Each structure stands twice: as structure tokens, then as C-alpha cells.
Amino acid sequence: MIALPRTARSFGWHVLCLVIVAVVLYPLVWLAFASVKPPDEILSRLALLPTRFVFDGYTKGWEGAADVGFGRFFLNSFLVAGLSVAANVLSCSLAAFAFARLKFRFRGALFAFMITTLMLPYHVTLIPQYVIFQQAGLVNTFVPLILPKLLATEAFFVFLIVQFMRGIPRELDEAAIIDGCSVYRTFWHVVLPLSKPALVTTSIFTFIWTWNDFFTQMVYLNDTEKFTVPLGLRLFVDTSSESNFGAMFAMSALALVPIVLFFLAFQRLLVEGVSTSGLKG
Amino acid sequence: MTTLRTPDPPVAPPASATRVRRRDRPVGRRRKSQPEAFAFLTPWLLGAVALTVGPMVVSLYLSFTDYDLFTSPKWVGFGNFAHMFGGDDRYLQSVKVTLIYVLVSVPLKLAVSLLVAMLLNTRRSANGFYRAAFYAPSLLGASVAAALVWRALFMGGGPVNELLAFFGWHTPSWVDDPQFSLASIVLLGVWQFGAPMVIFLAGLKQIPAELHEAAAIDGAGAFRRFRHITLPMLSPVIFFNLVMEAIHAFQAFTPAFVIGGGRGGPADADLFYTLYLFEVGFQDFRMGYASAMAWVLLVVIAIVTAIVFRTAKLWVFYDDAEDKK
């Protein structure tokens, strides 16, 4: 190995990496082509490229189910994800500012409690939460999906923003206080703008996780009218007939588009965010 | 994590500060609450009480009852727990499936992510591209769409079947076979190796190159350097990834739901714990039993985490803890 010239080693390294890239990205490329293949070719031919391009899957899939178009599912998903992002950024940065900068009783204990909730399986609070929302008549609305975010229950993001705010030099907010800024204005005009990278990371991950979330949305949403994209796709879960494959893969491909776009736009930031904070993908 | 920034030390008060303020300041812990703090904390506190602590207490209570959401809970003592471990075969099946999944997918995923991270730990060009490409499935893989694709890839006559047949290994339809079905879900988990890989990569970059150089001069081969330098230096990161991935794996749901066709797959081979919990709670409306299951899950995760933390003393090496040995 060591005796190999550098260029040869480098070449071998690139080949190895490209092989892994091919394996890792194969399912996605396969999906992209499967969505435009004639239905009878999807499973039967190993070749990625279709013999002819067919867009029936897209038109058929877009019709959705039970008279509700797939476009509606997309709108619902965007609504839920968008509101979740706004709610999460607001509530988590408020709590994070208190933990990072303000003095209050039981701060250590409350912070420790928050860290503990990071490891809590969601299921231990699920049923009573469901009962609360059910009693309040809020099942089958988007409230149970967004309210928890407005109340900063996603400790991950509170922690992420706390860590970031701790890195902002204290002299800046002390100077603002000395100049007569209230704590609120210091938060709004000094610390929050400086925390932008953490807020952007929070926004992106909240969006992607909400977009992908299946369990909570399935628990709380019943009407086809209220369905989000994952619930729309769920209708294909029982599908094994080839006639539905086209629609299934077309809608699956569309469902991944927003995440792929986010990824392409924020790729560097996402990867940095993971490596510095230990965020899960 | 190793890369987190530590808070800046508080600024020392100027010498001219008054006596009273001085006595308050140095430690900085004993000052009384700022009234504004609770304004900032209110949303989080409300959530912690109304959506976390309160529901936890209630679900602990419900776990000792029969509750169907419409009639009031009926106390059954340890009945739910007794039924779980003596009489509910599907429950035991779900425990078995989940344990196999955790024990196989977590080590496999960590091994793959560590190997690829080591591969990427160079200064060559295009590094960023590879890193991004490997990371992509971590974002996409948790979705229903990805699981649907996975199911098609592993179906009878699908690409995986064809490819393996090309190499002379004729497998049944993976998703319909009790033996292979879980394996396809494990592979879907391993496919998402990008997130731990990125964390490993950050850890690898912090290992001083001198250590490797010195060992290489002393005649240590690649494997010995890996065993005696990389692994110990990386152990805090391995520890972190292990804990996070294990907690995550215990709660896997979407792939099992989709690949198992929504019902736990062939012969309940994909009946994950959370899937059974969902069925019991939200299809049969046996919410007392589901709460009991949730609490068992919590306790198991707590025990596993505690074991990992306990054994950490034996294998996790912290640079600054040398003198404590």
C-alpha cells in the first residue's frame, strides 16, 4: 500500500468513494426514473432508464384520493411545517435566552430537566396528550401538531440555541444594558440577530422533521381533507398492483423534492450543524 | 460534544464597584431571579408542565388501568404488565423484533459510519461532495416516501432480487418473507449512516496527527494505530453516537409500518414495539395497555442508557481525565 505512488492512491480513493456514492444514491435515482417509467417496466427491468418516458403517474397521483387532490396534501404539509418552524424558532429562542443569559432560581435543575427530556421516548406522553386534545375537540385539526412546538417541547432546539448563545460575547449585551436597553430589547436587538445561524439550523431541521413526521400526523389527522403528504402516501402502503405503481412513485418523488431542495440549498450548514451539535438527521 | 463552545467567563467587576454588588458578583450563582426570566421561560414552562410532566404522571396512572378513551379508567393494578409478559404473544414478538433490530442495526450502522468517516478524513478535493452525498439519506430516509421506495426495491422481482440473482443468490421476495423482511428494514436504517458519520468525522479531525506520525515511526501498522490511537481517542464520540442511535432505534416506526404493509409484515416479522403500541392504543383503543407499554419502553431505554453510561468508564477515554485513574 505505502509503496503506491500518490496519484494512484488518490485515484483508488476516488473510485472507492464513487462506488459508495453510487450505492447510497441508487435508491433515489431509481425512484426518479421509476416515476416516469411505464408501469410494467418498473419492477421487471433492472435498467434505470425507461424505454419511453411516461408521466401518467404524475397526473394520476395528483388526483389524490376520495376527491381530495394530492395538491391539498402538499398545502397541508407546507402549512403544518411552516407554522411549526415559526413556533419552534420563537419559543425555543425565548427559552434558550433565559437559560443562556438570565439568572433565575432552579436554573440548573430546570436545565438538567430539559436535557433529560431529550432522551424521553415520545410515547410516554402521547396518550395523555391525545386525551387532552380529544377533550378539547382539537383532534383532526393541526393544533396538536403545532401547539407543542409553540410551547418549546422540542428540547433539542432549545439546547442547540443555548449552546450557540453561550458563545456570543457577553460584553455585547452588557454594553446594551449599560446603554439603557431593557432585557427584552437586548434579546430582540442584540442576541437574537447574532444567533441567526442557530435559528436557521433550527428552522431547517424543524421543517424537514415535520415534513417527514408520520406517526403524530397519523395519530391526530383522520379526514382525507386534512391529510398531509405522508398520510397521502400511506394510501399506497397496501398497493401491490402494478397499475398503482406509477402514481405511488410519482408522488413519492414529489414528496422528497422539498427536502432535496433544502438539502442542496443548505447542505454545508446542515452538515456543520450536525457535526457541531450532534443533531440527528 | 467535544466541539461545543464553553461559555465565556463572566466579566470581572471594575474595582470601583460598590461593596454590595461585589459580594453578589464573583460566583454569580446566588443572585436572585431576574423578573424578566420567567417571561422568557413561560412558553417552555407551560409545555414542560402541561405536555411533558403532567402527561407522564397521567400515563403512569393509566398504565395501571383499563381505559378506552370513552369510559372512565378502571384500576387493574399490575394487570397490564402481567398480561404483557405472560399471555400476550404479539407483545413478546414485538419485543423480540425490536431487540433484534436494535442489536443488529445500531452496531452495523456505527461500523459503516466510522469506516466511511475514516475514508473521508483526508484533505483531498471533492471531499465535501462525498460527505454531502453520504449525508443525504439521513434527511430523506425517515420519510414514508423513502420507505415505499425501499419496499419496492426489495419486493419479489425487484432490483435487489435481480441483482442477487445475477450473482447466483436466489432470494425470495424480501418484504414478504419472515426471514428477510426485518433484514430489509435493518438495511434501510444502515442506509442512513450519514448523520453519525458526520459526527465521527468531526471527532477524527480533532485527533492530533502527531500521534499517528509518532506511532508510525515506532513501527505501528495501520491496524494497530486504529486499535490503539483512533479508537481510544474517538471513544467519547462513539459513546455519544451509540447512545443516540440506540435511543433512536428503539423508537423506529415509519419503516416498519410501511415495509410491513401497515400490519407488522409477514408473520409479524416487522412488528416493531412502537407499531404494536400504535395498534393497541389507536386502533383497539386500549389506552391503559398502550400507556403501560410506553412506560416499559421508557424503563428499558433508561436501563440501556444507564448500562452504557456505567460501562463507559471501562472504554471511554477522556483526554482530561487521565489523572483520575
Image: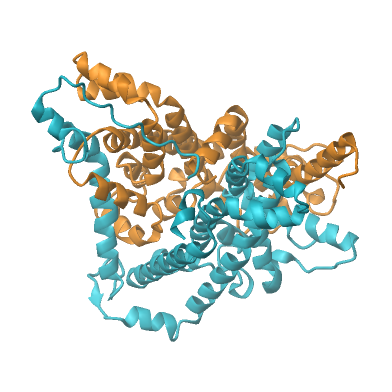
Chain colours: A orange, B cyan
Q: Residue at x 80, y 51 (%)?
A: A40
Question: Residue A37 occupies which quadrant of the picture?
Answer: top right
Left or right, B125 with respect to B19, comes to right
Q: Is residue B65 above or below residue B234?
A: below
Question: Residue A219 occupies which quadrant of the picture?
Answer: bottom left
Q: Residue furthest left?
A: B20
Res. A158 in view: yes
Q: How many dots with numbers?
A: 0
Q: Is residue B185 above or below residue A53?
A: below
| Coordinates of residue B195 in the picture (x, y in percent) | 59, 46
Q: Nearer the viewer, residue B152 or B210?
A: B210
Question: Residue B56 occupies which quadrant of the picture?
Answer: bottom left
Left or right, B28 with respect to B108, comes to left
Q: Residue at x 35, y 54 (%)?
A: A116
| Coordinates of residue B272 in the picture (x, y in percent) | 53, 67
Q: Is residue A235 above or below residue B256?
A: above
| Coordinates of residue B189 in the picture (x, y in percent) | 62, 56
| Coordinates of residue A216 in the picture (x, y in percent) | 43, 52
Q: Is residue A258 above or below residue B211?
A: above
